[in-house]
Amino acid sequence: MAKHKKSVALQEKIAILPDTPGVYMYFDSEGTVIYVGKAKNLKRRVSSYFNRTHDVLRTNLLVRAIADMKYIVVPTEQDALNLEASMIKEYQPRYNVLLKDDKSYPWIVVTNEQFPRVFMTRTKVKDGSKYYGPYSDQASARATLDLLRRIFELRSCRNPISEEWVEAGKGRLCLDFHLHRCKGCCVGKISRDEYMADIDKVRQILRGDTSELLGFLRAEMEQLSAQLKFEQAQVLKEQYDLIRRYQAKSVIVSPTIEDIDVFGIDDSEDDGDVYINYMHVRRGAVVKSVTLEYKRRLDETRAQLIGYAINEIATSLGASFKEIIVSEAPDTEMPDITFTIPQRGDKAKLLEVSERNARQHRIDKIKTQERHDPEARTNRVLKRIQSDFHLSELPRHIECFDNSNIQGTNPVASCVVFKDAKPSKKDYRHFNIKTVVGPDDFASMKEVLTRRYTRLMNEGEPLPQLIVVDGGKGQLSAAVEALDEMGLRGTIAVVGIAKRLEEIYFPGDSFPLFIDKKSETLRVVQALRDEAHRFGITHHRNRRSKSQAVSELDSIKGIGPKTRTALLTTFKSVKRLREADLDAIAELIGPAKASIVYGALHPAPEDSAAQSQ
């Protein structure tokens, strides 16, 4: 079907969208928001608007009117759902279904009564009751209510129960009491003080402290499992999983937060580029998001850069601030503004969302550069490796070595080659260890490196800029010794990877270098190590299987090499040969030899017993 053609700038934005949850906004040519949508995967959802003609006329009209788009990334799909609803209420886009306040998502209410009720509602009434939410996952809300009623046996009837009502004898026990779903407050079976103690615990859980509820479920699951009541335990496990996903308050939409501003900063890379995201929160929802870019020139501090961003937003957008959430207060004095540096709670989560959007802006910028210059990513990754490993030149050619043996049998080694940070499989090499007896990884590593680079030098082949050795200080020392003896020490850089990938050892250093787990350097090193391990294990397994097969046929007297080769070529393995009947074997090598082979592979019981004695 026909695609909707859009401007190059808009196509660029769509092409670099992240595969993360978020909310997207479409603008017309006048800059008016005409549609707000949510997505579990922003890239897939937004792209779907433009890659085909839609069956619904209104959708086609929307796509034709789109001149620009923006998006906000959020931690979860639930947050995207809540933020979408809040932004629709804020902007009221012409192509969205109009959502009415407080009726989009359910809330859990604890009523303002002497014996409060707890139930789910979509309507908020100003009668002193306490509302918790909103909830984007109705299943989680219902599961929470069911479990709260089960734990605390809360009343569900609509009777106007009060202490006077109970004393007047107006109450009557219902079926819930006999099913242990209610404690009978209507007839005085439980006092108001005892009932309110349970309500206080309910409020605690609804505020977000679900540890008590989860502890109860886990204990009951274990008890049911011990009683072999696995079906009932499974029901509780499903409820337990729902509560684990349950959030008493949304990260994005919080009724406790009114008007507030957030400045999140990302200066995670050492390239001098700094990104600061500004979010304006109105009535508990994010309604504006802008990301500013800065370049460090004189080692400006984070506090200085945040101060620059606040002034720029105030000037360009005409914004005024009362309270600003930041990770560091600016070094410029701003007496009319309260700066909050949150450690936990909703405000801390809002700061995290802002910082996430700042990081995403950096990623988008990198993706745009790489689309215009395919070599940009390769050069950037190589420069990062060069910086992390303190290399004198770009490591365009990297080789990684790994040893493989099982209790010293069939020792082998593998060499994998990466060129421009990508596997060069035609240059991979296997090595069968020749001079080392027993499981000596250090000596094996020295032998392999000596053989590898002696041959490369003799053949005039280029040498790598970096060698990565799978192992700690011992394997690294063996590699350095081999390079010393070949006169290559200082010509080729070498590092060792400890068992945990974040530990990198350099020659002569007692302490390892710890690389950030999110670093692209570590990703390349991990890919090298995994590929070397896979390549070596595959060769070792094949060699071991071949060795086992040949040794078993070697032990049969009267069967020579040509016959063994013919049998393995036809039947592929000793296992299949053992499963073959005598006629099939005789057809290949003749009845006399077939009888010898068949008898050796199918010894009589008395022969087996004799061999075992």
Image (spheres, rainbow, N blue to C red):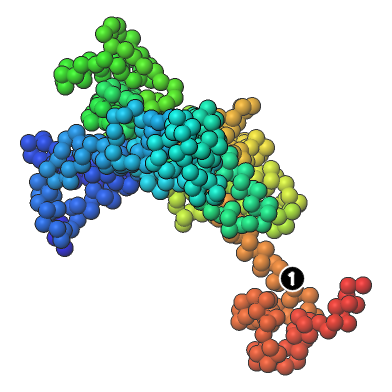
Which residue is pictured at 31% across the width and 29% down the height?
A: 127
Question: Residue 165's x, y, as percent?
Answer: 44, 33
| Residue 197 in view here | no
Q: Quadrant location of residue 552?
A: bottom right
Depth order, front residue of 70/581? 70
Classify mark 1: helix, strand or loop. Answer: helix
Which residue is pictured at 92% across the width and 72% down the height?
A: 613
Number of other residues with Cα within 10 Å of mark 1, as a class: few under 14, some 14 to 19, many 20 or more = few
Looking at the rendering, in which quadrant would you find the N terminus? Answer: bottom left
Q: Is residue 303 above or below residue 606?
A: above
Depth order, front residue of 173/612? 173
Amino acid beneath label 1: Ser
Q: Residue furthest left?
A: 30
Question: Residue 397's x, y, as percent?
Answer: 45, 43
State the residue position of label 1. Answer: 551
Which residue is pictured at 28% across the width and 6% down the height?
A: 335
On screen, residue 417 versus residue 126, left or right, reads right
On screen, residue 178 versus residue 370, left or right, reads right
